[in-house]
Image (cartoon, rainbow, N blue to C red):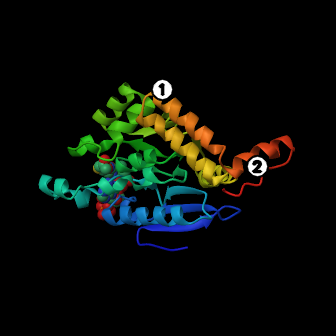
Amino acid sequence: QFQREFVLTEKTGSKKNIGLITLNRPKALNALCDGLMKDLSDAVDEFEKDREIATLIITGQGKAFAAGADIKEMQSLTFAEVVTGGFLSHWLRVSQCRKPVIAAVNGYALGGGCELMMMCDIAYASETAKFGQPEILIGTIPGAGGTQRIIKIAGKSKAMEICLSGNQFSAAEAEKMGLVSKVLPPDQLLPEAIKLAEKIGNNSKIVVGLCKEAVNRAYETTLTEGLNFERRIFHSTFATEDRQEGMSAFIEKRPPNFQDK
Ligand code: CAA
């Protein structure tokens, strides 16, 4: 367990095998300043290395998940500075995590906040959550996946409407377009996210990691290539002891005892 300036971390769940990361800059609605994104990357590093941790959850303290990149920090940056500094290039860390990451969206998920949610593998939202890509309203465009990921989830018309208007939309709308998989009353958001993380955590970590890799491949490649990749990954699970254990347990009518081997 460790604490950083902008991010709280804790091991939770009945087996303490879930890494809970809470964005903790509530006065600025968890605006994603450079320090917060560094703390978040470090927290992901820490939980990814920790062999006990099966699944990560990211949520926000206060009334926001995250209200986007820090506008006060960006306001005076020049083109030369953002280009030479590779501004936001280190934001990809969450999308590169080998373990499953669940977003528990407790409030505003705007701009970079919505993009951070889309970097996660699964999103649950509170009924009170609000989504949007409002960058256009401040004279810029999404810079961490908004123009690329929404279109893959919700199609061109929705992506254009969201990015070009800057309009906010509700959790119910986000669920309808497939951006989040469940909408929950605020007090049930985290317990339900933990329940899902525990369910995933009961599976073989090695096979979960392979499965995540196969699903993600669908974003990057053609159907034929993706199906070939999936089949090879499927074949490779036959090299694990956990695959043998899972199938034996089914036949012997007992719960499996996965060893992550
Ligand atoms: N950056 C910096 N500070 C922010 C912020 C942001 N993105 N969002 C909110 N804050 C700060 C406010 O400045 C305010 O601070 P002060 O008390 O010091 O004035 C504090 O958080 C509370 O915010 P509000 O008073 O505005 O709260 P509200 O309840 O009236 O409104 C809101 C809530 C609708 C979310 C509003 O804060 C808002 O519109 N925020 C900006 C949203 C936005 O434009 N996000 C996109 C950023 S650009 C981006 O993300 C680029 C990218 O793709 C990576």
Kind of residue at disc 1: Thr
Q: Which residue in the protein does label 2 denote? A: 245
Write the residue at 51% across / 36% down.
Answer: 229
| Distance in Å between CA atoms under marks 1 and 2 | 31 Å
Displayed-image quarter of ligand 1:
bottom left
In this view of the protein, which residue sits in the foreground, 33 or 79?
79
The answer to which of marks 1 and 2 sits earlier in the sequence is 1
Q: Is residue 212 left or right of residue 17?
A: left
The residue positioned 38% from the left and 29% from the top of the image is 158
- Which residue is under mark 1? 224
Is 78 placed left or right of 4 in the picture? left
Q: Quadrant of residue 194?
A: bottom right
Structural crowding at the residue carrying mark 1, measured as other residues with C-alpha within 10 Å and reported as few (<14), some (14–19) or many (≥20): few
Badge 2: how crowded within 10 Å, few (<14), some, or many (20+)? some
Q: Amino acid at mark 2?
A: Glu
Where is residue 258? Give x, y as percent. Answer: 72, 54
Give coordinates of residue 137: x percent, y percent.
Answer: 25, 42
* Residue 126 is at least partly visible in this image: no
Query: How many numbered circles does the render carry?
Result: 2
Pointers 1 and 2 in contact (C-beta within 8 Å): no
Q: Quadrant of the N terminus?
A: bottom right
